[in-house]
Image: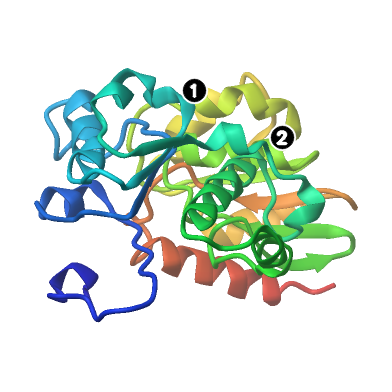
Amino acid sequence: LPILAQEPLPAGGVYVLELSSYQIDLTFSLDCDVAVLLNVTPDHLDRYDGFKAYYDAKVRLFEMQTAGRVAVLGDVFADFVEDLVGTVRWAKDIGLVRQTEMPSLQGPHNKENASAAIAVCESLGVKLDRIYHGLRTYPGLPHRMERVGETNGVTFINDSKATNAEAAAPALAAFRAVRWILGGRAKTAEIDACLPHLGHVRSAYTIGEAGPMLAELLRPKLPVTEAGTLDRAVAAASADAESGDTVLLSPACASFDQFRDFEDRGDQFRAIVKGLKA
């Protein structure tokens, strides 16, 4: 059930909401006990009148909080902190969590996410030993850096949820030798956020509407195969991959040119990987 349609929420328990800017736009009384915002990067600009309008929509989450609440922030939000009426906690002050404490969550972005989660749980009175037990045993979510198979020493990772370059960049940073599958319906005509991590990429395989554009951007920097479809991309990447490599679906694009949604894209990737012969 849509959580914001439940009035009032049943008493007791803790409700954890992942809110899009669209949902924040539609509510005027969401007074979160703890609200979290780690970063804002350009997205959904077809709906908003520029990046500032999108940014302001996200920040409204804190404007609805009343005194005594907690705001957990990434360090890029120092400009509006003086206007907040609640307690501010900086995710970076928790300290980055060691990878051994969260084995199923790879990448620097997940370390930042874990730091924010620790701040939230501490604010709600959860003891640290329980928090770290949760991190150690958490399996992760589908389509978000999800390990879906291993064949001949090659690991296959489903990161279909990465629908823009800013989301794909941490996945590239997380693995030493990557065979990168990317493409779909582009949200912008650049992938600048990914460029610092191309040293980890051995080869790229483009799919979908944005395939030719992405191939043109990447070809001066590394080997590129214009695969066109996901099944051909997986076949080509797995054929090229050597033991120790990671075949990574982290598309940096929306999915709607070839798939129902990012979940459908991830599910099909998982099925293709399971069909590979060892």
| Amino acid on which disc 1 is placed | Asp
Along the line of sight, the residue nearer the viewer: 208 or 274: 274
Q: Residue 224 at what x, y percent from top left?
A: 63, 35
Q: Are marks 2 and 1 in contact (CB under 8 Å)?
A: no
Q: Residue at x 47, y 26 (%)?
A: 75
Q: Residue at x 53, y 47 (%)?
A: 119
State the residue position of label 1. Answer: 192
Horizontally, is 273 left or right of 160 in the view?
right
| Amino acid on which disc 2 is placed | Val
Task: Point out the image quarter for the C terminus.
Answer: bottom right
Question: Between marks 2 and 1, how big is the CA–CA gap?
Answer: 15 Å
Horizontally, is 214 left or right of 18 in the view?
right
Q: Residue 10 at what x, y percent from top left?
A: 24, 81
Along the line of sight, the residue nearer the viewer: 237 or 113: 113
Residue 261, above or below 40 = below
State the residue position of label 2. Answer: 201
Q: What colour scheme has been applied to the protein in the rendered image?
A: rainbow
Horizontally, is 242 left or right of 107 in the view?
right
Q: Earlier in the sequence, mark 2 or mark 1?
A: 1
**Count the marks: how many?**
2
Q: Residue 150 at what x, y percent from top left?
A: 80, 66
Q: Residue at x 55, y 66 (%)?
A: 141
Residue 267 visible at all: yes
Q: Quadrant of residue 145?
A: bottom right
Mark 2 crowdedness (10 Å alpha carbons): few <14, some 14-19, many ≥20: many
Q: Residue at x 11, y 28 (%)?
A: 49
Horizontally, is 200 left or right of 6 in the view?
right
Task: Point out the image quarter for the N terminus.
Answer: bottom left
Residue 274, above or below 202 = below
Residue 250 visible at all: no
Mark 1 crowdedness (10 Å alpha carbons): few <14, some 14-19, many ≥20: few
